[in-house]
Image (tube, rainbow, N blue to C red):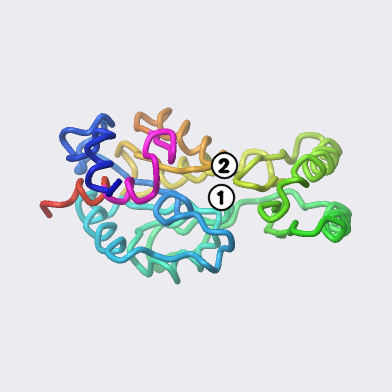
């Protein structure tokens, strides 16, 4: 089924006929996840492809929203810069740990509890015994990937849950797409949304948040608490391609 037909099937064929009510662009702020939302999900982060025309659509959306366009991603801010250039006004990377509020501005980093080093040692040892699994060490946390070894999901979760239980509430275990993430409590995509929305040109606008993963739930809920809306891939938009086409329909006349 082509994208145009899918837009009609899901009621997304035009910005004024969509089944998703969004604020007028002149009053809205768009805060968008990257992987699995703006671009198709890939096995390895380096395999990501920015679809042709996406940056043009985002540039038009930013102009229509008075610059109030932000990317909220698990990737570092520098990676979003490499992939999207100066198209977004604000970027929150590492799921809210690092935030740059304006182009060329400083990257602010949240204060984080130290990640116990013995967790990293145990994690390295564990993935070494489970072929197909992979450890990703991030500032303030770690991720256990099992996309290439789905049979290891339970083993990884059990180990990670045990480590988190030692933290006295400083860390939590978050599921994701074929992964388990240990991260600090309170610093998440919801935190990123709340911080971005406090600075110009976002302040006073109604946030529209779109994501695809369990880690986007806090962003969706925070946007709604701030008087905006939140949507998900694939619960609302069936695929990133359909979502991209919907975004393009919002700014088609511009």
Magenta highlight range: 230-245
Image side of residue 183 versus residue 52, left or right: right
Looking at this view, name the residue that lies furthest to the front. 1
Instruction: Tell me if residue 80 is in the magenta stretch.
Output: no
Given residues 10 and 174, the one toward you in this image is: 10
Estimate the x, y position of residue 38 in percent, counting from the top left. Answer: 39, 53
Residues tagged 1 and 2 counted as in contact (Cβ below 8 A): yes
Instruction: Report the residue marked by disc 1.
Output: 95
Instruction: Report the residue marked by disc 2.
Output: 215
Q: Residue at x 76, y 34 (%)?
A: 169
Image side of residue 169 versus residue 105, left or right: right
Estimate the x, y position of residue 251 in percent, counting from the top left. Answer: 18, 50
Few, some or many residues within 10 Å of mark 2 (<14, 14–19, 20+): many
Q: Is residue 39 above or below residue 52?
A: above
Image side of residue 56 versus residue 99, left or right: left
Given residues 239 and 159, the one toward you in this image is: 239
Few, some or many residues within 10 Å of mark 1 (<14, 14–19, 20+): many
Given residues 43 and 183, the one toward you in this image is: 43
Q: Is residue 141 visible?
A: no
Estimate the x, y position of residue 111 in percent, counting from the top left. Answer: 65, 51
Q: SS at mark 1?
A: helix
């Amino acid at each position: 089924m082509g994208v145009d037909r899918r837009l009609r099937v899901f009621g997304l064929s035009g910005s004024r006929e969509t089944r998703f009510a969004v604020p007028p662009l002149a009053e809205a702020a768009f805060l968008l996840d990257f992987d699995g939302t703006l671009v198709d999900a890939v096995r390895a982060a380096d395999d990501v492809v920015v679809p042709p025309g996406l940056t043009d659509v985002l540039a038009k959306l930013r102009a229509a929203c008075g610059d109030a366009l932000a990317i909220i991603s698990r990737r570092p801010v520098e990676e979003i810069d490499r992939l999207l250039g100066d198209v977004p006004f604000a970027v929150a990377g590492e799921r809210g740990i690092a935030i740059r509020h304006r182009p060329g501005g400083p990257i602010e980093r949240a204060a984080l509890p130290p990640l116990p080093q013995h967790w990293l040692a145990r994690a390295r040892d564990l993935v070494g015994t489970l072929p197909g699994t992979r450890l990703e060490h991030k500032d303030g946390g770690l991720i256990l990937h099992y996309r290439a070894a789905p049979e290891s999901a339970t083993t990884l979760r059990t180990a990670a849950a045990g480590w988190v239980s030692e933290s006295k509430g400083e860390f939590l275990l978050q599921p994701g797409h074929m992964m388990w993430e240990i991260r600090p409590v309170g610093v998440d995509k919801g935190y990123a949304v709340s911080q971005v929305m406090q600075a110009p040109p976002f302040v006073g606008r109604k946030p529209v948040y779109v994501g695809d993963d369990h880690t986007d739930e806090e962003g969706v809920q925070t946007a709604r608490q701030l008087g905006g809306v939140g949507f998900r891939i694939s619960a609302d938009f069936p695929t990133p391609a359909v979502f991209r086409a919907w975004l393009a329909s919002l700014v088609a006349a511009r």
